[in-house]
Every structure is written in C-alpha cells, then in structure tokens.
Image (cartoon, rainbow, N blue to C red):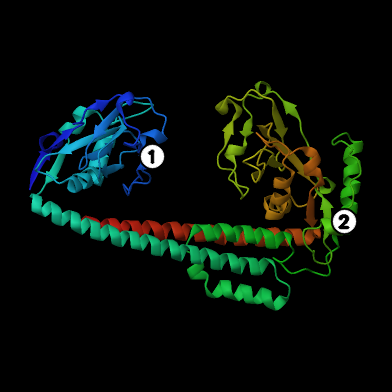
C-alpha cells in the first residue's frame, strides 16, 4: 500500500462546466438533495426539464465520483452510473487507472477523512471544502485487485447492516405497538380485573418494553392521564368531597375580589354530562378552569425591572413542567411588554407550538406576554399536572383561534373542563406522580447509560480491530 495525495490518483473537478442553454431536457440533473446522507443512495433521478435551474452546471461522465463539497453534505458521495450534469457544489472527480471508482467513494466517506475535512472547512454562512485542500488530502491506496476485494467485502457488510437496521426498526415498531396497546387498555378499563391484567402485563414485560425512551415518554403521559382520571391512587371515603372544596374556593374568591386582588368574573355554566370527557370517581367534580383558577395578568415594561428573573416558553421543558434554565431580563434583552408573576403561580404558554409548556414559578419575576400567570385555588402541583395532561391539551388544540400564530385566548381557557378530586386526594396524587416520575427519570438514565455503554463497547472493538 502507499499513502497518496488525492491529486496524484484522480482529477479533482476534472470536467467542464456547461451553460444551462446548452443542456438538453432529457439530461440527468443531480442536486445535493437527491443523495441520501451517510448511505450515499440515490434518492431521485431528475431530468433537466423537471427543474427550473438557470445556473451554471458541472458535467460528469459515467464512472466519475461525485462529491458534495458543501457542509453539511460532506458525506454525500455517489458513483455516476451514466453521464449527466450537477450543481457546482457537487465536484466530479475523475479517477485514474490507479483506483477504482467504488474504492475512491469509500475513501471519501471514511471517518478519518471526514474529520480532516471538517477541520479545514472555510466560510461562515456556507462552508465548503477548498480545491487545494482537497487535492492535497492524503489517502491510503492498496493494489487495484485488493481494492476490488475490499469493495466487495464492504458491500457484503453494508448489506448486513441494512438487514440489521430493518430488524431493529421492526422490533422497535412492535415494541411501541405492544406498549401503546397495554397503556390504552390501562386507560380504557371497564372493570377492575382488566386494570389488573394490564398492570400485570406491563410488569411482566417491563424490561423489554422500557428499553427505548419513546416508551418512557408515553409512560409519563399515561401516569398523568391515570392521575386525572382518578385511577392512580385509591379513593378514601373519609375525604371531604370536592363539592365542599368548591364552597371554600368560592368563599376565598369573594374575599379576594372584595380586597381588590382579583377581578370578579361572570358566573360560569355548570358542565353538562355530555361535556364530560369521561366518568369521574365518587367525590370528584368536573369544573370550569376559571372556577378554580384565576389568570393574573399584570403587564409591565422590562426596563422597570432590569434585574428581575425572566421566564419564557423556550426556558420550559415541553410536557413535564420543568424549568430548563434561569436568566434575567438583562440577559435576554427584553424590554416588554411582559407579565409580572409571583412565586407559586403557574406560568402557562398560550401560543403554539408551546401549548403544553407550563411550570410553577420558583421566584418572582417577569414572563413573556405570551404566557399566562395563573393563581390556582387548589393544590398547585395537582393543577400543573392537569394542565400537562392529554385531556387538557385536547381541549387546548380544539380551541386554538388563530391560523398563522394560534394563541389560546382567556375566554376559551376559562371554559375548559378540569377534574377536581377532594383536596387530600390531590395531595396523594401529587406524591404518587412524583414517585413515578422519579422512576421514569431513572429509566431514561438507564437507557442512556446502556446506549453509551453499547457505543463504548463498539468503539473499543473497532479500535482493537
């Protein structure tokens, strides 16, 4: 074998350019998007007549190696099986008799060359590999007969990799389907024995089902759904019913209105039986969102609070009520208008695509005007879980009232149906959710650790080889 520069065994960009007016309509026109990254499969073969392109093109001949020199397309390489033209961001490389086209393709796709090219890239907006750097790049060159044997072995192993990919995809799909069916059975139970069977199935096959993060995500959703359906913890007949809690909430709201802390709202209509998404346990009630919650908008300019903590939809993790990071108004340069919020309120994003982003404020501060600060008159952690649940999100999606930038308005929000359990049960539900979500966190960590371990093992084996 020999170490050889690319320019010694090939002609980089070795074909003539052509004006669009000189290209026949039936000529193959290759663009970068026609080549699949990583696999270098040809995804689509277009004739020149199919695309309105008036820019200068590169010509190529059958057997040329076509190399995408533009990041992020550096791993798009193709051996032309017929003559054609291509965008000038694809470089036709004409191999000499010292190298086969197929072997040159794999040389340009090998990880060490990709790393070398990435280190050389220039240009900020659209970085590309320079001609001089490409021509001077160093490659291993075996005897030509061995090149054929290497390419044959690569093709054989890649075919096995494709088969593994299909097998893995099929297993993943089956695992997701089985898990979805088990979760659906758990949610749509008609009798206690069905509930127990679904639980027993998940327990028996736990180690098989929860090896992918997608299933853990669905498990989190199922936990919240069971919670708001009254199926996560047992009911206690000694708990005062939710109807008693509603009387206390009404008295509290009247006091706050009298003190000028909240505004009086028009009476809300009771929820009719046909409006209820599902049947609730004894002692629970379906209530309107504004029956137990109050939006406290207090628009201010950020310049009046330059050092306040600031929360926006992008700082909230989607679907799980966690704050991703902390920042101040000065950090983000916001000047307003913003909503003032107070510790313990629920901050809820009212704009798509962040309609399932909500968090309990850990401090006083300012939030984006696209968020509602909500004071709740029940267990704040329980209400957060209700807002994050699928039954609430379904109502939100139905009520979106704009097309280009749909936002949830106050009138729609206030009318949503929310389940209300007795206050002691709310506390028990929150404690159980916390316990189960911690287990889900552990599952996610175990899956990540197993994946990393597999990668480390594979890398070690490959390094040893």
At which x and y percent is residue 217? 56, 57
- On the question of residue 74 being in view, the answer is yes
Mark 2 or mark 1: whose residue is earlier in sequence = 1
How far apart in space, not on screen, are marks 2 and 1 (Cα)?
54 Å
The residue drawn where x is 24% and y is 46% is: 110
| Residue underneath mark 1 | 33
Relative to 234, 184 lies left or right: left
- The crowding category of the residue bearing disc 2, from other C-alpha atoms within 10 Å (few below 14, some 14 to 19, many at least 20), is few
Dots 2, 1 in contact, CB < 8 A: no
At which x and y percent is residue 397? 69, 46
- The crowding category of the residue bearing disc 1, from other C-alpha atoms within 10 Å (few below 14, some 14 to 19, many at least 20), is few
Vertical comparison of 213 with 28: above or below? below
What label sits on residue 272 in the rendered view?
Answer: 2
**The furthest residue to the top:** 303
**The furthest residue to the bottom:** 193
The residue drawn where x is 74% and y is 62% is: 229
At which x and y percent is residue 116? 24, 38
Relative to 328, 289 lies left or right: right
């Amino acid at each position: 074998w020999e170490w050889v520069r690319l320019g010694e065994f090939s002609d980089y960009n070795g074909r003539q350019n052509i004006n669009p007016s000189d290209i026949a309509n039936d000529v193959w026109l290759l663009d970068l998007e026609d080549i699949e990254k990583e696999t270098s499969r040809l995804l689509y073969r277009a004739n020149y007549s199919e695309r309105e392109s008036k820019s200068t093109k590169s010509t190529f001949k059958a057997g040329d190696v076509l190399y995408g020199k533009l990041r992020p397309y550096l791993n798009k390489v193709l051996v032309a099986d017929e003559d054609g033209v291509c965008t000038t961001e694809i470089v036709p490389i004409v191999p000499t008799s010292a190298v086969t086209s197929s072997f040159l393709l794999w040389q340009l796709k090998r990880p060490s060359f990709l790393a070398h090219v990435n280190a050389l890239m220039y240009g900020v907006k659209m970085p590309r590999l320079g001609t001089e750097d490409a021509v001077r790049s160093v490659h291993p060159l075996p005897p030509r007969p061995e090149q054929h044997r290497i390419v044959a072995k690569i093709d054989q192993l890649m075919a096995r990799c494709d088969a593994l990919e299909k097998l893995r995809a099929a297993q993943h799909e089956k695992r997701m389907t089985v898990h979805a069916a088990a979760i659906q059975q758990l949610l749509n139970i008609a009798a206690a024995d069905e509930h127990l069977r679904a639980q027993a199935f998940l327990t028996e096959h736990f180690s098989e089902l929860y090896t992918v993060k997608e299933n853990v995500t669905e498990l989190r959703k199922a936990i919240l759904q069971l919670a708001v359906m009254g199926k996560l913890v047992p009911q206690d007949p000694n708990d005062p019913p939710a109807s008693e809690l509603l009387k206390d909430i009404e008295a509290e709201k009247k006091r706050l209105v009298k003190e000028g802390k909240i505004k009086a709202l028009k009476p809300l209509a009771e929820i009719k039986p046909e409006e209820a998404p599902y049947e609730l346990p004894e002692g629970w009630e379906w209530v309107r969102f504004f029956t137990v919650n109050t939006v406290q908008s207090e628009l201010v300019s950020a310049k009046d609070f330059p050092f306040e903590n600031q929360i926006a939809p992008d700082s909230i993790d989607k679907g799980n009520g966690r704050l991703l990071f902390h920042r101040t108004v000065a950090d983000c340069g916001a000047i307003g208008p913003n909503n003032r919020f107070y510790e313990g309120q629920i901050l809820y994003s009212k704009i798509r695509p962040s309609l399932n982003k909500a968090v309990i404020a850990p401090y006083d501060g300012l939030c984006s005007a696209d968020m509602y600060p909500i004071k709740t008159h029940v267990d704040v952690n329980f209400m957060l879980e209700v807002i994050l649940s699928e039954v609430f999100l379904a109502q939100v999606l139905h009520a979106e009232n704009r097309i280009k930038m749909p936002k949830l308005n106050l009138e729609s929000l206030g009318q949503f149906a929310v389940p209300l359990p007795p206050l002691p049960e709310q506390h028990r539900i929150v404690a159980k959710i916390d316990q189960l979500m911690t287990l889900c966190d552990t599952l996610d960590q175990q899956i990540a650790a197993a994946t990393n371990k597999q990668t480390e093992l594979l890398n070690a084996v490959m390094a040893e080889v």
